Amino acid sequence: MSILTTEFGPVGFSDHGTGPALVFVHGFLFDKRMWQPQIDHFVPLGYRVICVDMVGFGDSATDANIVLMADQSRAVAAVVDACSVDSAVLIGYSMGGQVVLDFADRRPGQVAAVVLSDTFASLDPDQGRAARLALADRLEYEGVRDYAEEFLPLVLSERSVRERAAVADRAREMMVDAHPAGAAAALRGRALRPDYTGNARRVSVAALVVVGAEDAFDRGVLGTELAENLPQSQLTVIAEAGHTPSMERPYAFNTALSEFLHSIPFPLDIVGEKTTVPGV
């Protein structure tokens, strides 16, 4: 684990392996630890895996009242620059997928491809924004522990909650460990985010959209809509997974990602040395 000092405060990240870079960005109430199954799978295959803590989560603590999505994107960019990565596949989950869409619009030359898991680009209705702002206040006032138990069955399928104890325990641990003030600041930024539909339409590289078949937030609509707005997209639906297929069905998720990576011009024979980040 490394911590980079940025204008947004400390930004935590982990950097594993050498080779073509895969940059992973987690979603709300999780942190970079959610990507352990992907680290275990892709590093032995010759990829460099960089996992970033969004500002407000994990090792990216913040005292700010709000962290805008543009600043989340810039924090990811700071890590990419510090790691001397010229081009990477950007993989984002849920809120992290929206950060990836922002990054791809700001720095298209550094994006070899995008992978968007259980996310959507269209604007939230006013009611949804108001609910997120109210939840941010609640988290800051009450803490995260009680809400984690409410959130767990929304981000995992019923089967995962009932039968996949290790997955449920790992998800619960990350949520309970989340900093209440940091989570609230990030959620306020998420509530006030712009519409990313235009960003999706401007993505000029290959894109993979992954959706859990039992995603309570998607219901078979938003993933399809996102894929239709991406000019060069594939849509993969992971059976028996809820909102978090990368943790619930890691073999299926990793297989879909591996097949996608082998379908794009991102050769494994371009293996570079890992760069030591000054001051980290």
Image (cartoon, grey):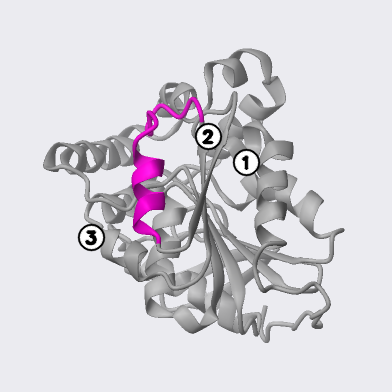
- Say the numbered circle drawn on residue 176: 2
Residue sitting at x 53%, y 16%: 158
**Residue 133 is a magenta residue:** no
Left or right, 33 with respect to 180, comes to right
Q: Residue at x 66, y 73 (%)?
A: 265
Checking the image for residue 246, the label placed there is 1
Magenta span of residues = 213-230
User: In what element is the residue under mark 1?
Assistant: helix
Q: Which residue is outermost to the right?
A: 44
Instruction: Look at label 1 and name its amino acid.
Output: Ser
As helix, strand or loop, the secondary structure at mark 2 comes to helix
Earlier residue among tags 1 and 3: 3
Q: Is residue 30 left or right of residue 147?
A: right
Instruction: From the top left corner, tell me how far across and down residue 107 is, in percent.
Output: 44, 80
Residue located 60% across and 67% down the image: 89
Q: Which mark is residue 194?
A: 3
> Looking at the image, which is closer to me, 143 or 155?
155
The answer to which image quadrant residue 135 occupies is top left
Separation (CA) of disc 1 from disc 2 = 20 Å
Q: Residues within 10 Å of mark 2 (few under 14, many from 20)?
A: some
Question: Residue 4, percent across and down?
Answer: 58, 74
Residue sitting nearer the eye, 29 or 207: 207
Magenta run includes residue 221: yes
Q: Disc 3 vs disc 2: which is toward the camera?
A: 3
Crowd tier of the residue under label 3, counting other residues whose Cα lies within 10 Å: few below 14, some 14–19, many 20 or above: some
Quarter placement of the N terminus: bottom right
**Disc 3 from disc 2: Cα separation:** 28 Å
Q: Amino acid at mark 2?
A: Val
Identify the residue at image location x=50%, y=39%: 211
Question: Is residue 32 visible in the rendered structure shown here?
Answer: yes
In the rendered view of the protein, which quadrant contains the C terminus? bottom right
